[in-house]
Amino acid sequence: MEIRLRILLLTMLLGLAGSLSGCATLRHLFGTAAPAAAPAPADAGASTDRSADEDSTPPRVIQPEVERRNLKVPRIKSEDIELGGYIGTLNIEDFGAHRVFGAQLAYHITEDFFLQAEAGRSKAGRTSFETLSNIALLTDNERWFKYYDMSVGYNFLPGEVFIGRNHAMTSSFYILAGVGATDFGGDSKFTANFGAGYKVLPTDWLAVHVAVEDRVFNSDLLGVNKLASNLEAHLGLTVFF
Amino acid sequence: MLRCARLVCALGAVLVLLCLTVGVRPAQAAGAYVQVFVRAPYLELHTGPGRGYPVFNVVDRDASVDVLKRYTDWFKVRTVGGVEGWVAAQDMEQTVLADGTPFHYDVGDQNAFTSHRFEAGFFPYGDYGGASALSAYGAVFATPNLAAELSVGEFLGKSSNGTTVDLGLVHIFYPQARLAPFVMLGTGVVRIEPKATLVQPEDRFEQSAYVGGGLRYYLTRRFFLRGEYKEHIIFTNRNQNEQVDEWKFGFAFFF
């Protein structure tokens, strides 16, 4: 009985071992599988085919399949436009000197000539008459002195300023003249402007300006027609781009 | 308080602009510059962008430089050794690009004056029905002969001030000629602010039409002079329409 049982168990074990040895899944499970054999015979066959081809056809001329590269030249950045703002003092004729704010935009045509547009505003104070009589000639809104102009400028005496031994900054004096309009005292007036300035460039793209300009227009604000001269001095900061 | 806030806002905007400008500069990749090779015996580098600035360095024939930027007719370049200086445009014409083609800087010529896409100009001298007038215009060209034009102006007179906006067509007769005549036709609007001391009249806003002609004279590079005459008919709601003559003279450029 015992021997029969032993034979039965051994037979089952042999049968199980025989069936498992053919199972590919289990071979991989235990990591014992050999790497897949390279299909060497197939390759060998192909190479013999190719050599047979080369014998029968003439050698091919090499045809380059490299496309000509279109060189894209980068765009050179230009810095002919100058934009910035300024703060200064505007002496409004008969109405005292007051702080003025403005913006300026310039286009440099050549190293000598440039076109410049300016727009600014200031608020007039009271005339001597108003102070003494306590009568207001203008409303609060009419005291705003707003202007714009378009000018042609000319750089002259270009040069360099030096800070110590190692730093040089380009600089230039300039004169400019133009026309524009001034809104003051409830009226708009055709205005001529002219002036001069000095600019220093700490870097190629940044300029510090000091300028003095006169804005002249025909005024009849105080009952007499006269040429009103409004002198402005300002300090500006501009960026070239 | 409001003024203070505005001032702070303005200063803030300026600071942001400055930071942006400063911040953008280093971001420009080293390889993003045009590289040119010297074909003349040497290339002179000036200390500044102007004819009077001294020459402080020269670049030998066949050496290369990177073109960093341009200011008017001057190019800022950097040599292989890292020296930066300014080169005049006529000297740059003596260099070639990496593929051997000559470096060319287009400053505009009469051919471009004949045929271009856009132009803009400013008329500092003008007379609008007896009032001093200032105006500016921009134009888009469909063909060398035909353009659509938008003009904006302000007139300042003794009896009234006002603004005008005109939109119309321009036909140029001989665009290839240095002095080219043209005719115009269009429509527009005009805002008239009458001046009065006793009663304050209301501003008028009227539609108008115009016909006119003028001359363009090519100066140099991208610039030309322009003078013109326009006859405006202002359509009023009264019995008679108004007729206004406008003369103006100015300068313009094309691009």
Image (tube, helix red, strand yellow):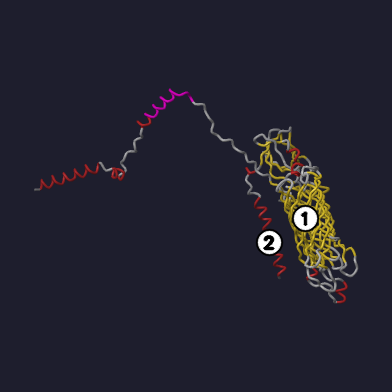
B166 to B159, vertically: above or below: above
| Direction left: furthest residue | A1
- Identify the residue at image location x=27%, y=43%: A23
B162 to A55, vertically: above or below: below
Decide whether the magenta segment is chiefly helix, strand or loop.
Answer: helix
**Residue type for callout 2:** Gly
- Secondary element under disc 2, as helix, strand or loop, is helix
Query: Are labels 1 and 2 on one chain?
Result: yes
Q: Is residue B12 magenta?
A: no
**Residue type for callout 1:** Ala
Q: Which mark is residue B113?
A: none
Q: Is residue A51 magenta?
A: yes
Q: Name the residue that disc number 1 marks.
A: B136
B86 to B187, vertically: above or below: above
- Magenta residues span A45-59
Q: Is residue A177 visible?
A: yes
Q: Residues within 10 Å of mark 1 (few under 14, many from 20)?
A: some
| Direction front: furthest residue | B239
- Secondary element under disc 1, as helix, strand or loop, is strand
Numbered disc 2: what chain?
B
Measured as percent of width and height from the top left, residue A110 is found at 78, 46
Tag in front: 1 or 2 = 1
Q: Residues within 10 Å of mark 2 (few under 14, many from 20)?
A: few
Picture quadrant where residue A228 is located: bottom right
A128 to B208, vertically: above or below: below
Question: Disc 1 to disc 2, how far (Cα)?
Answer: 32 Å
Q: Name the residue that disc number 2 marks.
A: B12
Judge by depth and name the residue closer to the eye, A192 or B238: B238
Measured as percent of width and height from the top left, residue A36 is found at 34, 38
Judge by depth and name the residue closer to the eye, A48 or B170: B170
| Direction bottom: furthest residue | A134
